[in-house]
Image (spheres, coloured by chain):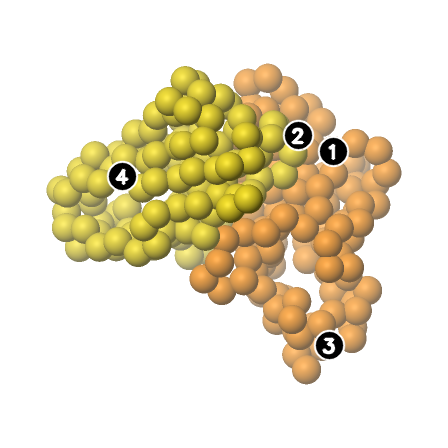
Chain colours: A orange, B yellow
Amino acid sequence: AQSVAQPEDQVNVAEGNPLTVKCTYSVSGNPYLFWYVQYPNRGLQFLLKYITGDNLVKGSYGFEAEFNKSQTSFHLKKPSALVSDSALYFCAVRGSVTNTGNQFYFGTGTSLTVIP
Amino acid sequence: NAGVTQTPKFQVLKTGQSMTLQCAQDMNHEYMSWYRQDPGMGLRLIHYSVGAGITDQGEVPNGYNVSRSTTEDFPLRLLSAAPSQTSVYFCASSRNRGHEQFFGPGTRLTVL
């Protein structure tokens, strides 16, 4: 079965400190991995993706994520958090095999609060 | 380029009523999908389409129908609304399976 887990419902971090939002996945075949951000009363916005290649992926707004195949993880990171980063973050995976490769699976989301 | 548009933004229905949520995209994307977002449950896939004339069920399809007669439009029909369908509904599109999805602004539906 395909699934995504975000083990933390809430992450708090002080402004200027590094932040990490965790994601682990289970999927058949090679995964396509994505991070999205959602601000209040808005749709989801794409941050970054991993399809293949370098395990460290850089995305929008200074975010990056590291693909770790052995740990089946794809944690989102930022070296220095901003108050404006406060939002709901979703990890998503799409399988690469034919019978599951058309469906995205989303985690339950992690609410990030950056404290001034 | 409007991206993904959804109408209406808000809707209140009574149990048993039917309605259609509209979704359109102007990016010529092949892949479109409908999700519902409920607190603590993330986004769950209702139905999706990989091209005009092709649709398939997602994780939670019961009580919903879709069709894809054109590349641009992907309406979601609630056949007989139930309180359990109270949710925020998002439509999304992507160029193909390896690309990121673009999301619409959502429709907040309340079923009384």
Callout 1 crowding tier (Cα within 10 Å): few <14, some 14–19, many ≥20: some
Disc 4: host chain:
B
- Placement of A36 over or under A69, stated as above or below: below
Foreground: A65 or B66? B66
Give the residue number, with chain letter if any, for mark 3.
A15
* Residues at discs 3 and 2 both on one chain: no
| Quadrant showing the C terminus of chain B | bottom left
The numbered mark, 4 or 2, whose residue comes first in the sequence reads: 4
Give the residue number, with chain letter if any, for mark 1.
A51
Tell me the CA gap for discs 3 and 4. 44 Å
4 or 1: mark nearer the eye: 4
Left or right: B54 in relation to A108: left
Give the residue number, with chain letter if any, for mark 4.
B20
Identify which amino acid the numbered label 1 is placed on. Ile
* Residues at discs 4 and 1 both on one chain: no
> In the image, residue B107 lies at what x, y percent?
36, 51
SS class, disc 4: strand
Identify which amino acid the numbered label 2 is placed on. Gly
Disc 1: host chain:
A
| CB atoms of marks 2 and 1 within 8 Å | yes
| Quadrant showing the N terminus of chain B | top right
SS class, disc 3: loop
* Residues at discs 3 and 4 both on one chain: no
Identify which amino acid the numbered label 4 is placed on. Thr
